Structure formats: structure tokens, C-alpha cells
Amino acid sequence: MPIVAIVGRPNVGKSTLFNRLVGRREAIVDSTSGVTRDRHYGTSEWNGVEFSVIDTGGYVDQSGDLFEEEIKKQIRLAVEEADCILFMVDVREGLTGMDEDVATVLRRSKKPVFVVVNKVDTYKQVHEVTEFYRLGLGDLFSISAVSGSGTGELLDAVVGAIGRGHTPAISDGDPPAIGSVETRHASSLQESPDIPRIAIVGRPNAGKSSLVNLLLGNHRAIVTPVPGTTRDSTHTPYHGYGLDCLLIDTAGIRKKGKVTEDVEFYSVMRAIRSIEHSDVCILMVDAERGFEGQDLNIFSLIQKNHKGVVIVVNKWDLIGKETNTHKEFEAMIRDRIAPFRDVPILFTSVTRKQRILKALEMAIEVCHRRTKKIPTRELNDTMLPIVEQYPPPKLKDKLIRIKYVTQLQKSYPIFIFFCNHPQYVKEPYQRFLENKLRERFSFTGVPIEIFFRQK
């Protein structure tokens, strides 16, 4: 699929145009300068031609910002990957020295470049557009990304350029150290029910983006020691070592009381939405900080949304170890997450590349367990003898008889037990049946729901 990159200095409307092209509010948009940091991908279509769109961070030069060099690196990668470039400028602020710096970089790329003059919201501003001819990059396209004015002419030109047979910048090859990213875009895979969607979630600075970069074998996400570096949720297809999935890197989720900025609020909401739209979540835990209350909150959020879960304890190499350190840490986690204890727990070190691929393998296994359908006959042949041997306790002198069990055809395991007095079956017996289902049919890492209905 052809790739179109949107570049420019901060706060010219790149993410607004990105959201308009992909038809969804995927990228965070705020009046604050420098909101976008990582490359953000989406898929667009115009006149029957599909193409990928890359949103990038604002190009800043000599600002002293901690993320400046990392954002520049992301922009360079996007330009190298793209077949066509949309260079966005702001008509309200006019031509700036930073715009000229970006233009110099784009001339070296030898790619088709379209100068997109944004925020042309009134007729008077049309005459101010001509100033940008000084960039020497050809025709100008006056648009308003907010209202959509002028985007039709721009897309006609873009589709004409990418339809002339530009060779994609990235070709298929051998997988790098851990895996490889396919050139087809992530959004085209999101709708496929056969591709596991794996969200990597956790508190800030737990190592989520480092894990994604290591798995993909490239600098996909910006990584710094500063908590809250990642803002948007990024979707990237993974294909390597016989594993196929969609990796979703998310912003760190902090407690509500600690979220003070609008941008961080939107970042947390994107992360929560990623959990809701995933199949399995890898919950990253910082070994140095332990399994804290916020980790438990995120785990509960995953469970309430009926998603599979794998707990990955990162930075395990920084922990001083004794004979039973591993077992004690794991037992502590299982006590905190009770009664849902049947969860894979893996101890890793992203910096030392320890057990990273194992985490992904576990997540995909959990995804397969989550969609497992047990034949009704097998379910009854297994569970009814257990019920007969260990029947529900009497309540109010009522003898409870379970006669039949079946699994609903849902995206996660739901079991219905039909009996004569469903209102008298209490939670302890429900947990007993859940444990037996897990024991006999292997639902490790998958939340189960059990209901009792009148026979």
C-alpha cells in the first residue's frame, strides 16, 4: 500500500489532517505545541485508491527540548518510508525559518512533496498563501483541516502521484533481531478477526515502548527515562518467528488524581480504549516498584473488559535475588489479583533481551484460549459428573440440581448452567465451577463468566 507522510513544524495541524484523512479521532489534537511524538499510522481512501498515512511530531530545531532529537529521528524514518510527503505550514503565522529548514530536509529526500497551507479559513487568507512559493517546492494547496475545505483537491493530487508507480521505500526481507514490521498498514489488520490484537499496558515508565521497539527490531516508539513519553496509542503489525499479531503500544496509565494536563487525560483515555479494543493485554510491571495499587487497577480494568492477560515483570535484572525471590514475588502478585489467580506471570529484562519473545508467545496462546469453543457434549460429559460428586450446598432447605451446561457463542468464555433454583447458587460454588473449568479445559490468562439459569 502506498504511504503518505505528514510533516511540518509543531502546531500547524498535522494531527487534525491525519484524523480527517483516516476518518477517526486517532491522534490526540490539542492547542499545546508538540503533542505528537511517535509516528502514528492510519489508512485512508480516495477515489477508490487506498493508502497509508503517517502522522509525525513537529520538527523543532535547537529548542533544547528533551525529545527534540528523538522526534527528528521519527520524522526521518517516516520520510524514508513514505512514497509521498505532505509538508504542512500555517498561513496565520506565515513562512518561518523553521519551515525553510524542513523544506531543505525534504528536498534531499527526492520524494514528491506537496506544500499544504493550513488554517485558510476565510477568503482574505487566500491571498496570504502565495508567500509560501518562496519554499520552491511547487504548487500550494490551501486547506482548512478543521472544516475539510480544500482537502478534495489535495487528495486528487496525492492519489495522482502515488498512482504513478512510486516504489515503496521498504521491502520485505529477513526479520531483524526479534521480528519485523510488514509494510502493509496496521489499520488494515485491525478489522481482521484472525489477527490477535495485543495491547501493552501499564504505569508510566514500565518499559512498554522499549518492549515494542525490541520486538519490532526498529526504533518504532520514542523511549526516554521521563514518565509519560508515549502519548498516542500506536498500532503496528508484527510478523516474525511464526507469530502474527497487531501490537498496540499505549501511554502509561496513572491514577485519576495525578492526571492534571489535558494531553495526559487524552493519552490515558486512548490507552483505556486500546484495552477495550484488544484481545489480550500484556500488563507491564516495574520490578523495582513492585505490584502497586495502580497495577491492580489496570488488571481489574482488563478483567472487567473480559480480555486475556499476561503479567510481565520488567527490569528483573535490577532486583537483588535470593533463593526464593522469584517465587515470593509471583506469590505476592497472585495474592493481590485473587480470586482470578490463573494468570501467566513472566519475569523479563527488556534491556538485556531476556524472555521477550516468550512474552509474545504467551500472549498469543492466551488469545487462542480466549476464543476456544468447547463442544456441548464434551462440556456436559466433563462437568456434570463433577457437579454430581460435589453438588451445590442446600440453601433454605432447597436441593439444587444442575442438569445441563453450555457455552455461549461469544468472543470470550461464557458458560450457562441450567438448574432448578439458580437464585440459590452462591459465589463460592460459582468459583468452584470456574476452577474446575480452568483445570479441565486450560483457560489460563482468560477471564470466565458463569451464569445460572432456570432449566
Image: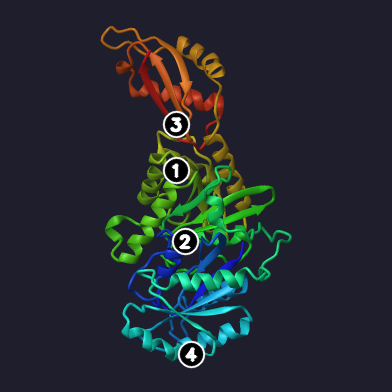
From the viewer's side, name the closer residue of 255 and 16. Answer: 16
Crowding around mark 4 (Cα neighbors within 10 Å: few <14, some 14 to 19, many 20+) is few
Asked which secondary structure carries label 1, the reply is: helix
Q: Quadrant of the N terminus?
A: bottom right
Decide if residue 222 is in sight here. no
Q: Which residue is mark 4?
A: 133
Q: Earlier in the sequence, mark 1 or mark 2?
A: 2
Q: Nearer the viewer, mark 3 or mark 1?
A: 3
Q: Please name the amino acid that badge 3 sits on.
A: Ile
Q: Which residue is mark 1?
A: 333
Asked which secondary structure carries label 2, the reply is: helix
Judge from the rendering whether residue 184 lies leftward or rightward of residue 45; answer left or right.
right
Instruction: Using the numbered discs, state the Cα–Cα distance from disc 1 to disc 2 in whole angstroms.
Output: 40 Å
Q: Name the residue at 47% across, 73% down.
A: 153
Instruction: Using the numbered discs, state the Cα–Cα distance from disc 2 to disc 4 in whole angstroms.
Output: 28 Å
Q: Which residue is mark 3?
A: 448
From the viewer's side, name the closer residue of 175 and 322. Answer: 175
Q: Are marks 2 and 3 in contact (CB under 8 Å)?
A: no
Q: Are marks 3 and 1 in contact (CB under 8 Å)?
A: no
Q: Nearer the viewer, mark 1 or mark 2?
A: 2
From the viewer's side, name the closer residue of 386 and 27. Answer: 27
Q: Name the residue at 33% across, 77% down.
A: 121
Instruction: Using the numbered discs, state the Cα–Cα distance from disc 2 to disc 3 in whole angstroms.
Output: 35 Å
Asked which secondary structure carries label 3, the reply is: loop
Q: Are marks 3 and 4 in contact (CB under 8 Å)?
A: no
Instruction: Using the numbered discs, state the Cα–Cα distance from disc 3 to disc 4 in whole angstroms.
Output: 62 Å
